[in-house]
Image: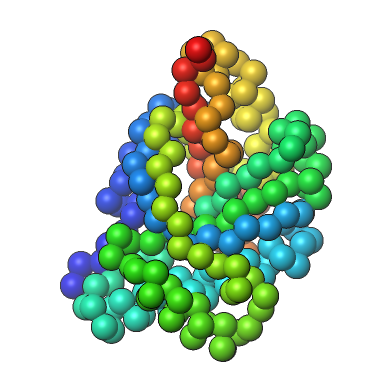
Amino acid sequence: MEKYDVKKAHKQLYSPPKGAFAVVEVPEFRYLAVDGKGDPNTADAYAEAVAALYGTAYTLKFASKRTLGRDFVVAPMEGLWRADDPAVFLTREKSAWEWTMMIGQPEWITEEMVVAAAGEAAAKHPNPAFEHLRLVAFTEGLCVQTLHIGSYDAETPVLQRLHEHYLPYNKLTFNGDHHEIYLSDARRTAPAKLRTILRQPVKPVE
């Protein structure tokens, strides 16, 4: 049985260059998702969301293999980040951040499978985030992305270069939430070695 791995199936989208920006077209993807607000380092809601997502994702993986004979690699954690004032991302005012944490799902995973898996995972390790977990699908379309290696707080110069130089120079503007894809496990990786894809949906300036 060949495992589906989104990072291999869509290699161009999961292996951007380090230190340079790449323009990509992102098709529709489906995700387990939980919304929240607050500092990801200290907010209980964030830790609960991550736990619910991983618990459901691994339960889905095992259920898919057992009942459908289709196995897959659990996709990396991803996050959509937004705020009333986008400047708080550059100033790192984290209490004002709003987020949607997500884990990508293969196209054959159904709403019914998600409900069953979330219920099973919640029974083992209950937390409030399970009540808000859902399956979503969306298409980001035209995006600019790069690979950042280092701590999350060291992203600011990269984002400033993207926002203040690359986008204006290329006559592009924002067209969606700031998107991060976490290729490293922060629990087991030194901050200086964290690998994170920084992605920004864009559109031409009219």
* Residue closer to the observer: 200 or 176: 176
Q: Residue at x 51, y 18 (%)?
A: 172
Total marks drawn?
0
* Left or right side of 58 for 185: right
- Indicate the position of residue 47 as horizontal and vertical percent values: 68, 67
- Corner quadrant of residue 13: top left
- Residue drawn at x 75%, y 67% is 44
Where residue 167 sits: x, y (%)?
A: 55, 19
* Residue 110 appearing in the image: yes
In the displayed image of the protein, which residue is found farthest to the left?
1
Q: How far across and down, in percent of the image, does residue 87 sit? A: 75, 31
Residue 165 as seen in the image, left or right of residue 154? left
Residue occupying the point 30% across, 51% down? 8
Give the image location of residue 29, x and y in percent: 38, 50
User: Looking at this view, is 44 or 117 the one in front?
Assistant: 117
Q: Nearer the viewer, residue 107 or 22?
A: 107
Residue that lies at the very extreme toward the bottom in this rendered image? 124
Measuring 62% from the left and 23% from the top, which residue is drawn there?
A: 163
Report if residue 21 is visible in the image: no
Residue 18 against residue 203 in the figure, above or below: below
Specify the quadrant that holds the N terminus. bottom left
Q: How is the image coloured?
A: rainbow
Left or right relative to 73: residue 184: right
Residues 200 and 133: in front is: 133
Seen in the picture, residue 156 relative to 127 is either above or below; the reply is above
